[in-house]
Amino acid sequence: MDIFLQQLINGLVLGSVYALIALGYTMVYGILGLINFAHGEITMIGAMLALAVITHLTGSALPIPVILLAGLLTAIAGCSALGLLIERIAYRPLRHAPRLAPLITAIGVSIILQNLAMLIWGRQYISFPPLLPQGWIDVAGARLTDVQLIILITSALLMLILDSLVRRTPLGRAMRATAQSPRLAGLMGIDANRIIAVTFVIGSSLAAIGGFLVSAYYGLAHYYMGFLLGLKAFSAAVLGGIGNIRGAMLGGLLLGIIESLGAGYIGPLTHGLFGSNYQDVFAFFVLIAILIIRPAGLLGESTADRA
């Protein structure tokens, strides 16, 4: 039981990060019907920016919380600006083009961001400075580290705030109206371009926070880390129901739990056949099986719930 609880905790931590990143995919798709494949690279840029600032400030007279906050805020600001730039330059001119054109553009932007990050930060892994607390809490024989607790609390708060914003605020109503029909929303006085830009800012900010949390959890960041993170987050959005805010949250949590349980129970049994990354194969196998049964995802693509 303690092994199961440990894997469950690990899965919830991973899944909460996947959910944060998946929200960016599902919000953009909810409004534009576009899969922003550059979103994983925005997550990577957030991690690299945060680590660059934190590494630079480490050893200064500033308190540790201030150093971490400075890195996080820099990542959020940089990724928000990057998201706006990508939307304005790469996606807005193709908004009424055939759907394949913005898809190819998104893949191109992803490759460009990967190579820019490699040129700026190099190919080597960047270590997260040892600034975070190293304590842990006993949970029925399993360990919940301070970093894991921070990730769980931060992710839960952000998801609750976003859900409330989309459902209960004028901005959220404008986002839902734009998702249903940008043209009709414009007739009601809603500036669709502004709403789409705000959506990219929110999604990119969540991606930046997700990148920061991932690098803090694993203690590393790399110019290529956004590819697999983005793929898993996109899969989580599809699993929950692409375009559905709560579906992205549910899909992220489930994918993290499935991956962790697969690594803990099935991975050791098949290590000799498939290697150490079998948990990824297992997670995507379960994803395919679920989508065969429910092609629209677990919660479906509900127009009323789209961002």
Image (cartoon, rainbow, N blue to C red):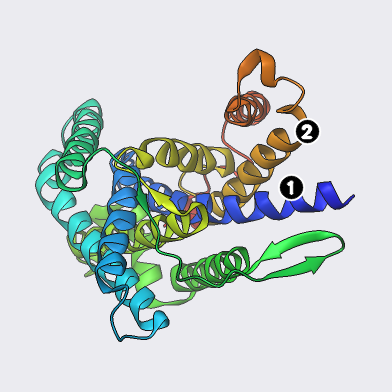
Give x and y (percent) for residue 195.
26, 63
Q: Residue furthest front?
A: 59
Q: Are marks 1 and 2 in contact (CB under 8 Å)?
A: yes
Residue 95 is drawn in which quadrant?
Answer: top left
Neighbour tally class for label 1: few under 14, some 14-19, many 20 plus, Cα within 10 Å: many
Would you say 33 lies left or right of 166 here? left
Report how far apart the C-alphas of labels 1 and 2 lie in the structure: 9 Å
- How would you rate the neighbour count of disc 2 (Cα within 10 Å): few for under 14, some for 14-19, many for 20 or more? some
Question: Which residue is label 1 attached to?
Answer: 7
- Residue at 78% x, 33% y: name it: 265
Q: What secondary structure is found at the residue carrying circle 2? A: helix
Among all residues in the image, which is located at the extreme top? 273
Q: Residue at x 59, y 24 (%)?
A: 281
Is residue 186 in view?
A: no
Q: Which mark is residue 265?
A: 2
Query: Percent x, y for residue 168?
Result: 48, 76
**Residue at image x 19%, y 28%?**
101
Q: Earlier in the sequence, mark 1 or mark 2?
A: 1
Q: Nearer the viewer, residue 171 or 16?
A: 16
- Amino acid type, label 1: Gln
Residue 112 found in image quarter: top left
